[in-house]
Amino acid sequence: MSLRIGVDTGGTFTDVCAYDEATGRIHVRKVSSTPDDPGRAIVRGLGELLDQIGGREMAEVGYFAHGTTVGTNALLTGRGVRTGLITTRGFRDLLELGRGRRPDMYDAQADKPNPFVPRDLRMEVTERVRHDGRVEVPLDPDEVREAVRALKAQEVASVAVCLLYAYVRPDHERAIGEIIRDEMPEAHVSLSSEVLPEFREFERLSTVVTNAYVGPVVADYLARLRSTLAASGLRCEPHVTQSNGGVIPFVTAERLPVRLVLSGPSTGVVGAAAICSAAGFGDIITFDMGGTSSDVSLVQHGEPKVTAGLEIDGRPVRSPMLDIHTVGAGGGSIAWIDSGGHLRVGPASAGAFPGPACYGHGDEATVTDANVVLRVLNPEYLLNGQLKIDHAASYRAVARLAERLGLSVPDTAQGIIDVVTANMARAIRVISVHRGYDPRDYALVPFGGAGPLHAARLAAELGCTTVVVPETPGAQSALGLLMTDVRSDFLRTRRVAVHQDTIDQLSEVLDELTASATAWFDSEDIDPARRSITRGVDMRYRGQNYELGVPLPDGPVTEDTVRRLRADFQDAHDRVYGYQLPEESIEAVTFRAQAVGAVSRAGIVRSAPGGGTPADAVTARRQVYLKETGAPADCPVYDRGRLEVGHRVTGPAVIEQMDSTTLLLPGDTCEVDDLRNLIIRTQGS
């Protein structure tokens, strides 16, 4: 078995990537997504790819990994299951009360999102655990059984359990879980002490409810796909990527679907970090622009930034995940005119169907149509001829907007590009400038089908002087699945002052996490030689309400460890907030450990300089409208597959490949490095 397969399902296309361990070659296939059942596109893409590389058999696949947006889409569209909640008496309404903050401070009419569990499906039980784990009021099993039967009568498919201070003492939640499984064996059960053993009641409640709400949807999807793949001849255990950038087996993911919220975009970041580190670019900003959205993330010293959670549609979800910010700006984002007569782009998308007007089904102008009108994109076909393009349909769609705006069609198309570029730049500033990082110090790494097309202008907007385009940018997330490891996160909340006298307390919590990680390694049957554990601590000045994550050095906790922790926290606080308080007491709040099981990865292969000249790769010349020249420019069109290591190209130019298109602006220079990346130096370099 020499084939390793990675599959990424997007809103418009499903990317299938195969790494042949015998030859070291990577093969890519793109097919239209099937939103009603993503598994259909996966099976179709797999079949086409296996045929493409010589009629290989599914039984030859030794590793299969998948990135999915099924859980995220269920959250955003409100298509989860009927969910019930059991909580401590007196806390029934916490799901709506939240933190008492308005969604928008300056909008008195703003509404909070509707809770996933309506009030009549929230059951209270008498019990009380104190903050130190002491049981003040024992749990009444008969009352719990009565509440569970009431939920069963209401035909709920999933039950979330969240009790006060369950992260300190989970006994009561576990007892309730057993009663639910006894009374409702068919129901999906989510316990907050298992999903998120962390303090902050509202965030823990929101997270466990989210897990329960999408749990059956994700579990059913993964179970169906696992069955379909097995019927197609797949013999290996399929894996799915998590928000933290690692993969876990399907059967494990079915228990904790909340960890798949950023399943789709996370592996693209992991793969880009590995490729760019090998190319000598440890500090990068990744920019994944697909058909529906753009996902951006910051990587420092080759390591993606990690966050403890995010908000989805106003609902907090706490789970270890890569720090990825998403904006509704993709190739399929629809351009429209607001009530004030201003041009807007997104977040609505034409999706896979009907898609952009140029695909032959839709009639609304999208970002893709704007690029077709400007002839930056091939006006006849994409995907090496697999997808025919209707240039006239794009022109008509953009012309309707142009008439309303009183602009020419090219100026309107360029306006669409400018608006979407501004949207993407704003997203990147959220994960860089707003957190104390200067984007000018980072290389921009575009991928996704549309990323390289917009990278040069986005780099100019941000002041980035270097752009690194990977060899297969359109399938980077699928390729990233073949470069990521098996991993799981463990955490404990325990407030401990950080100083020389608390070394034993710090060590005790960390030892507990290490034991949990080791047990997980054993349960997943991971080779001891491939195991590693990375630790970190969320810290704050005593009295603060929010923490900053600080990595913890390897080895036992010593006086030197404590000094380093304190210094690193002070530096992080200064970077984020602009000041330090050296005399203030510092405390650790939540301890974290990430267990990583290294897997055999797709190799990063270096190539020797090739022969010929860049002129040999020119396949055509095209009149491309560029605002930088104020008129159509005669641009050479290069076939990226014919560009060899060491070749240099000067803009303006267009570089085409099966899965993406790269635009070079006037003054930009591009060189192919020995990893076959395009290293673009912008005109501001």
Image (tube, helix red, strand yellow):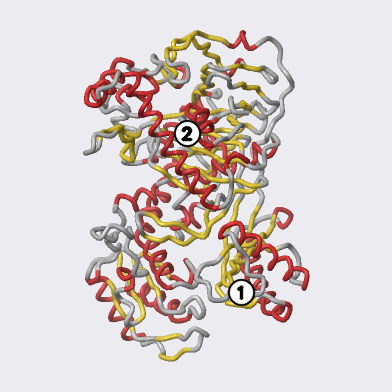
Numbered disc 2: secondary structure: strand
**Percent x, y for residue 317?**
43, 60
Marks 1 and 2: in contact by CB < 8 Å? no
Q: Foreground residue, 654 or 630?
A: 630
Where does label 1 land, which residue? 587
Q: Marks 2/1: CA distance?
A: 45 Å
Numbered disc 1: secondary structure: strand
Where does label 2 land, which residue? 15
Q: Foreground residue, 527 or 518?
A: 518
Quarter in which the C terminus is drawn: top right
**Percent x, y for residue 11?**
38, 38
* Number of numbered discs on residues: 2
Please indicate whether residue 558 sits to the left or right of residue 357 in the image: right
Residue at x 39%, y 48% (from the top left corner): 70
Please indicate whether residue 220 sits to the left or right of residue 132 in the image: left
What amino acid type is highlighted by mark number 1? Glu
What amino acid type is highlighted by mark number 2? Asp
Tag shown at residue 241: none
**Percent x, y for residue 132?**
52, 85
Q: Reply above or below: 309 against 13.
A: below
**Percent x, y for residue 586?**
63, 73
Dot 1, crowdedness within 10 Å: few (<14), some or many (≥20)?
many
Q: Foreground residue, 278 or 221?
A: 278
Residue at x 47%, y 66% (from the top left corner): 195
- Residue 249 visible (yes or no): no
Dot 2, crowdedness within 10 Å: few (<14), some or many (≥20)?
many
